[in-house]
Image: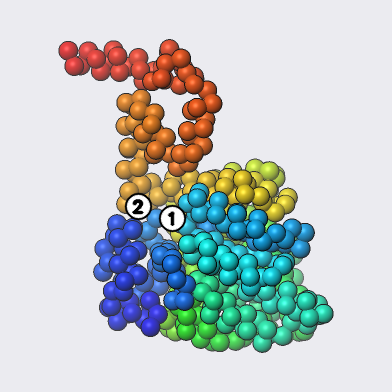
Amino acid sequence: MTQMEAAKAGRITSEMKTVASYESVGAEWLCNQVAKGEIALVKNENHQGVAPLGVGGGLRTKVNANIGTSTDASDLEQEIEKARVALEAKTDALMDLSTAGDLGLIRRRILREIPLILGTVPIYEAAVRTVQDGGGIIHMKPETLFDVLIQQAEEGVDFFTVHCGLTLQSLERLKKQGRLTNVVSRGGSFLMTWMIANEKENPLYSEFDHVLEIAKKYDVTLSLGDGLRPGSIADATDRAQIQELLILGELTQRAREANVQVMIEGPGHVPLDQIRTNMQIQKKLCQNAPFYVLGPLVTDIAPGYDHITSAIGGALAASEGADFLCYVTPCEHLKLPNADEVREGVMAARIAAHAADLVKGVPGAVEWDYAMSSARRNLDWNKQIELSIDPVRAAALRKSAAPKEEDVCTMCGDFCAIKLVNQTLLGSENE
């Protein structure tokens, strides 16, 4: 029985109790939201040693970190180290986007050694298998793709990104309207190439019932991918993007009828003034399904700093209803990230997520900020470091510039405003 089946029957599962306790919400309320499809409890029944992850409205905004090899950089131990760093930085989930090396071994190592919810993009492995068998991507057999889905589900992968909304119809709309950056989704480009070369419909769409059958068997959450997401500010909120979203809304309804949990993936590159509109359109068309946004990046001109452009967009998107932020590292658009860059990406996304949670009234968010401000008022530096989103960095910075007096910092030194007020204004009140 899937979590959605149990929820529709009014049965509060152990996973629901775990998430409700972690999120400080009522178990009955959570059960009702899962039944409606507005919250997903992400966890494959075969994935042992990991807690379920609640994603959706009313819960803390979650953060995902991408790792994985490429054909130019394929080092298994390096990817495991990046996964450990992401875990230490308190990401909520990982996605393995590997396209080189022993993909199965990489995935199984992560599942075994890293206690985090794990997602994949199965079309990657299907494409790699086809190339390794001596053919181009255009020769990929749909059976290969579904074999990958089954194998990964059996191994314990918790959520799949599947680009089911990329159809021949949506590609035709893309061609008619034109775009500056066309298709920037790697999975989307694989499928588009195959569809055009074979003059056939996307098998993930035409055989969506088979996808649902596989997902339901293992309670894998489907993250309905945005293969036509905008890869530049100029392409944001265009007809191709919205056409794909319309299809994803229809597939969301079919998934719920089949008792399969879904999330919807969103853009991409979006200017600030269009973020609210994008969130509202998604929530409306997809019946308030959890929304997983890739950024969004609010400008195209900041290679080397795209963790910042992403955090700006992510904070606004989450405050307007996005539920899950995919991190972006400083080296997005430039290279595969190293462990330090993974850490920076996670921290930037976590800051964005928390900033949004303050606006959304998520339990515990305001209290965290209040505790930090109280520690600052009291010049309690140990407590400030303890409450920091990144205590390791905060402690290192504090230690690197030790002040003459331990109760202040080197920014103001003897002229510390808080110390002065504590001695005068507050001191006079106590007389």
Position of 273 with respect to 365 (left or right) is right
Which residue type carries mark 1? Answer: Thr
Label 1 crowd (10 A; few <14 / some 14-19 / many >=20)? many
Position of 97 with respect to 7 (left or right) is right
Observer-nearest residue: 98 or 231? 98
Quarter of the view holding residue 367? top left
Observer-nearest residue: 216 or 312? 216
Residue at screen point 50% across, 50% down: 88
How did the renderer colour the structure?
A: rainbow
Q: CA distance from mark 2 to mark 1?
A: 9 Å
Residue 262 picture location, percent across and down: 48, 73
Residue 67 picture location, percent across and down: 62, 59
Residue at screen point 58% across, 70% down: 108
Looking at the rendered structure, the secondary structure element under dot 1 is: loop
Please say whether residue 381 is visible from this viewpoint.
yes
- Which residue in the protein does label 2 denote? 362
Residue 364 picture location, percent across and down: 32, 48
**Quadrant of the snapshot with the C terminus:** top left
Quarter of the view holding residue 375? top left
293 is higher (above) or lower (below) than 263: above
- Which residue in the protein does label 1 denote? 61
Position of 246 with respect to 72 (left or right) is left
Which residue type carries mark 2? Answer: Val
**Looking at the image, do the residues carrying marks 2 and 1 touch, with CB atoms under 8 Å apart?**
yes
**Quadrant of the snapshot with the N terminus:** bottom left
Label 2 crowd (10 A; few <14 / some 14-19 / many >=20)? some
Residue at screen point 48% across, 45% down: 351
203 is higher (above) or lower (below) than 93: below
Observer-nearest residue: 318 or 337? 337
